[in-house]
Image (tube, grey):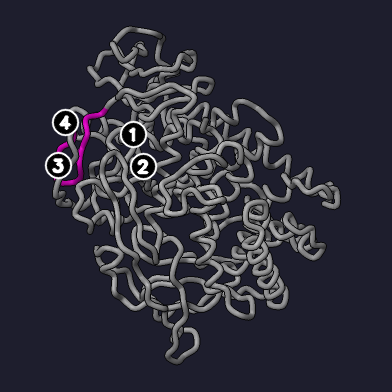
């Protein structure tokens, strides 16, 4: 492969020579109060010297193992913790990524023996060794645990407290006042809207994204129950008859049930009129308001409640029945209101997750059919599926992929009632999309399964690609699907432009200053653990790791949920 260069890669090389590293430059200088050990304050962010970029948590013995380097490499060695060489090979490259950076790839898939390792390189430019990492069957276990702590830390309306790596994180119950109905009913009045998860780095709560997050987590339970059922997490409910994983999900589902109106419509969101300052959850005194209902939020509510009904039925049949009744009521409401309904935006200064509803309606109908076998739901599902296709990159505004997965992968005994031609078409699309993702991941120097544009929350998109790869694996168990899946996780744990973990509290140099109000307001040097940040965009070095950078450094429950799904299929 011929060596190519560009202005951007030349600038990048110049930055390296100055010791600036990736992810440290922005158009506007920012002030950092403190930088973690091993980094320095450039005035633009906390910079780390660049290293061989690896998954800094670890690799599974039987899956692909690769690292990436942005300087010329002739050969590399994988060394054990004592420095002994266990594997040596030539680097692959030069190659170029979508940002026209010239890179070299190091493939050490042949190293399968469990243990602690690091990678060193030889070439014309001196370069730092990788950080140490593990190879083992259980390398993702601690990652799943901390991601679940990330969800627990987002709880609203109840006291939160847990310990991670010797640091105690806690806050009292927050946002306990009933919320105002004034913007909905035009007159004073309140209703209970307590509970659930805070959506992101602020304290709002949204039906579309809340249902989306719970839907992905419940899908992980359906696909990998044997890997999740016996796991203990640091929950107040630990030790009851319901598995801890489902106890955490119940927190959000209980709140979603409160968002359903008597007629079956579902409130779009519950927030203050504007974002709060960087105060603690209990220091946020702004009045909170119910918004108008939305057809997209109502359809997503149908989907996740129908899904919850079948997931919880074996462990909590009474709660399952409540969920199913709620799903049916909202489904009937949507049948009587086929028009798209967006919530009234004013006077909120922010109105997130407003989206068109065909994909949401398809997802809701397909989940209800999968749970009940209802003929009307099947008809609505197939009408919706006719306009939906599995995608590589998708997010809260396009949930058609979830509808397609549920329809094609149905476990119902009467699934032969489906349109056979439609099933074959969508199944073929699932595997075709996965084949392309696997090919792209294998060729991409960063292991990413897409070369598409980056946007807000791109790290969640990378994690979410694993859902499509897993759906395809259930249809055709090709090992390259799993290799592509683990490479998305590799990217989020350090095989990326900054050589840093994107999850607080785990891996090498994880985010130190996420745009997360509890982390900024609690007086603790370390941020709350287990939060996947949104990631760099539009260019790969735009993450500055400063608290006021919501664009790249905020967290969100739908990103965490996607990575929980991705990891759940690989834990021991």
The relative height of residue 569 versus residue 546 in the rendered view (above or below) is above
Q: Are marks 1 and 2 in contact (CB under 8 Å)?
A: yes
Q: Are marks 1 and 4 in contact (CB under 8 Å)?
A: no
Q: Residues within 10 Å of mark 3 (few under 14, many from 20)?
A: some
The relative height of residue 206 versus residue 140 in the rendered view (above or below) is below
Point 28% across, 57% down: residue: 518
Q: Is residue 370 magenta?
A: no
> In this image, 540 relative to 36: left or right?
right
Q: Earlier in the sequence, mark 1 or mark 4?
A: 4
* Between marks 1 and 3 in the image, the one whose residue lies nearer the viewer: 1
Point 54% across, 39% down: residue: 230
What element does badge 1 sit on? loop
What element does badge 4 sit on? loop
Point 42% across, 82% down: residue: 180
**Separation of marks 1 and 4 at Cα, in angstroms:** 25 Å
Q: Position of residue 197 (x, y in %)?
A: 43, 60
**Separation of marks 3 and 4 at Cα, in angstroms:** 14 Å
Q: Quadrant of the N terminus?
A: top left
């Amino acid at each position: 492969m011929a060596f190519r260069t560009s202005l951007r890669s030349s600038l990048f090389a110049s930055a390296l020579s100055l010791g600036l590293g990736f992810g440290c430059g922005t158009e506007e200088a920012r002030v950092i109060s403190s930088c973690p050990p091993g980094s320095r304050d450039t005035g633009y962010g906390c910079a780390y010297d660049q290293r061989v970029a690896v998954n800094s948590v670890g690799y599974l013995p039987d899956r692909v193992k690769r690292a990436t380097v942005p300087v010329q490499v002739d050969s590399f060695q994988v060394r054990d913790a004592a420095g002994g060489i266990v594997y040596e090979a030539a680097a692959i490259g030069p190659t170029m990524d979508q940002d026209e950076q010239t890179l070299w790839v190091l493939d050490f898939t042949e190293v399968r023996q469990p243990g602690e390792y690091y990678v060193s390189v030889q070439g014309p430019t001196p370069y730092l060794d990788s950080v140490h990492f593990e190879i083992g069957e259980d390398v993702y276990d601690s990652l799943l645990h901390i991601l679940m702590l990330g969800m627990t830390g987002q709880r609203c309306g109840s006291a939160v407290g847990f310990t991670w790596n010797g640091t105690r994180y806690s806050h009292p119950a927050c946002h306990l006042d009933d919320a105002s109905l004034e913007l909905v009913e035009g007159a004073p009045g309140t209703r209970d809207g307590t509970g659930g998860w805070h959506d992101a780095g602020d304290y709002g709560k949204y039906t579309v994204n809340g249902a989306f997050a719970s839907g992905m987590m419940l899908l992980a339970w359906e696909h990998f129950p044997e890997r999740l059922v016996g796991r203990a997490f640091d929950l107040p409910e630990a030790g009851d008859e319901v598995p801890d994983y489902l106890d955490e999900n119940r927190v959000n589902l209980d709140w979603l049930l409160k968002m359903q109106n008597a007629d079956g419509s579902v409130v779009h969101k519950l927030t203050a009129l504007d974002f709060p300052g960087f105060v603690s959850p209990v220091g946020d005194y702004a009045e909170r308001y119910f918004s108008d209902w939305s057809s997209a939020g109502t359809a997503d509510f149908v989907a996740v409640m129908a899904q919850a009904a079948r997931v919880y039925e074996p462990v909590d049949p009474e709660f399952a029945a409540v969920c199913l009744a709620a799903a049916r009521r909202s489904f009937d409401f949507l049948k009587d209101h086929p028009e798209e309904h967006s919530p009234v935006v004013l006077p909120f200064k922010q109105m997130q997750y407003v989206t068109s509803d065909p994909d949401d309606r398809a997802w809701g109908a397909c989940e209800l059919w999968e749970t009940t076998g209802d003929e009307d739901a099947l008809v609505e599902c197939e009408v919706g599926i006719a306009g939906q296709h599995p995608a590589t990159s998708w997010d809260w505004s396009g949930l058609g992929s979830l509808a397609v997965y549920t329809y094609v992968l149905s476990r119902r005994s009467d699934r032969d009632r489906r349109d056979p031609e439609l099933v074959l078409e969508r199944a073929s699309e699932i595997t075709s999309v996965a084949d392309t993702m696997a090919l792209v991941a294998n060729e991409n120097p960063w292991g990413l399964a897409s070369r598409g544009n980056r946007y807000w929350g791109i790290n969640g998109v990378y994690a979410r690609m694993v859902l499509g790869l897993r759906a395809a694996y259930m249809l055709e168990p090709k090992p390259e699907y799993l290799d592509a899946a683990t490479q998305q996780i590799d990217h989020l744990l350090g095989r990326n432009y900054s050589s840093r973990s994107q999850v607080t509290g785990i891996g090498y140099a994880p985010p130190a200053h996420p745009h997360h109000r509890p982390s900024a307001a609690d007086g603790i040097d370390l941020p709350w653990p287990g939060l996947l940040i949104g990631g760099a965009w539009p260019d790969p070095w735009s993450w500055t790791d400063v608290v006021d950078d919501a664009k790249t450094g905020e967290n969100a429950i739908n990103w965490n949920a996607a990575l929980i799904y991705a990891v759940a299929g690989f834990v021991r």
